[in-house]
Amino acid sequence: MQRFNDYKIILASNSPRRQQFLKDIGLSFTIKTHEVEELFPPTLQGSEIPDYLVKLKAAPFENIAPNEIIITADTIVWSDGKCLGKPKDAMQAKQMLQQLSRNKHEVITSVAFTQSHQQTVIHQTSTVYFKPLTAEEIEYYIDHFAPFDKAGAYGIQEWMGTIGIEKIEGSYTNIVGLPVAQVLATLEQICDQKSRNA
C-alpha cells in the first residue's frame, strides 16, 4: 500500500495467520521476533492482560529508526473471569474445551505499534458462543488438529470453529488473531499524523 511507503513495518510475530492477514491487505513488512517469557501480573483482568503482553513483546526492540513501526500482537480467551492461554498438553486442551462448551467467552486481541518516539496500543473484543461439545468431538479435534499453539485450545478457522460455534459477535479476524480493520485504521492514523506534523 503506497501510503505506507515511508515506513518500514516490522511484524514481531511468528504466527502464520497474522502474517497472512497483513499480506492479504497488501502491506509490505518484514518479520523479526525476540523470545519473551509471556508472564503477566495475576492482578490483571481481561484486556489488561494482552495490553501488557504486547508491550512486553515490544520491549526488546532497541534503536528503532524514525521510519520503523514495530507491530506486536497477543490474543487471549477470557472465560468465566479467567484467562485461557495456550494449552500445555492434551489434558489441558480438553479442560479448556470443556469449559468453553455450551458457554460464551470473549476473545481479546491487543496490538502495539511501537515507534522511536511513541507507542500506540489498541485492543478488540469479540464474543464467541459455543454449542454443547461431546467428549468425542473434543477428543477428535485435539487428536487431529493439536491446537497447542492457540489460546483457548481452538482455532475458529479450523474444524472446531465449523462444527462447534453457534455464533459470534464482533470481528472474525480478531478471533483468528488480528483485528485487521482496526490495525489498518491505526496505521492510517499514524501516517496521517506524520503528514500533519511535516
Image (tube, rainbow, N blue to C red):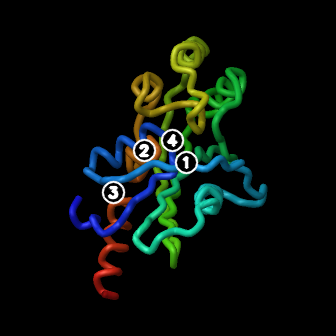
Report, in whole angstroms, how far the alpha carbon at label 2 lies from the one at label 3: 13 Å
Q: Nearer the viewer, residue 146 or 162?
A: 146
- The residue depicted at 70 percent of the width and 30 percent of the height is 88
Residue under pointer 1: 75
Report, in whole angstroms, how far the alpha carbon at label 1 lies from the one at label 2: 11 Å
Mark closest to the chain's N terminus, 1 or 3? 1
Amino acid, disc 4: Asn
Q: Position of residue 87 (x, y in %)?
A: 67, 32
The dot on residue 181 is 3
Residue under pointer 4: 14
For residue 174, above or below residue 96? below
Residue 48 appears in the rendering: no
The residue carrying pointer 3 sits among few (fewer than 14), some (14 to 19) or many (20 or more) residues within 10 Å by Cα, namely few
Dots 4, 3 in contact, CB < 8 A: no
Report, in whole angstroms, how far the alpha carbon at label 4 lies from the one at label 3: 20 Å
Report, in whole angstroms, how far the alpha carbon at label 1 lies from the one at label 4: 13 Å
Q: Which quadrant does the N terminus fall into?
A: bottom left
- Numbered disc in front, either 4 or 3: 4
Residue under pointer 2: 18
Q: Secondary structure at mark 1?
A: strand
Amino acid, disc 1: Thr
Report, in whole angstroms, how far the alpha carbon at label 1 lies from the one at label 3: 16 Å
For residue 14, above or below residue 137? below
Report, in whole angstroms, how far the alpha carbon at label 2 lies from the one at label 4: 8 Å
Dots 1, 2 in contact, CB < 8 A: no
Amino acid, disc 3: Ala
- Numbered disc in front, either 2 or 4: 4
Q: Position of residue 141 (x, y in %)?
A: 53, 18
Q: Secondary structure at mark 4?
A: loop
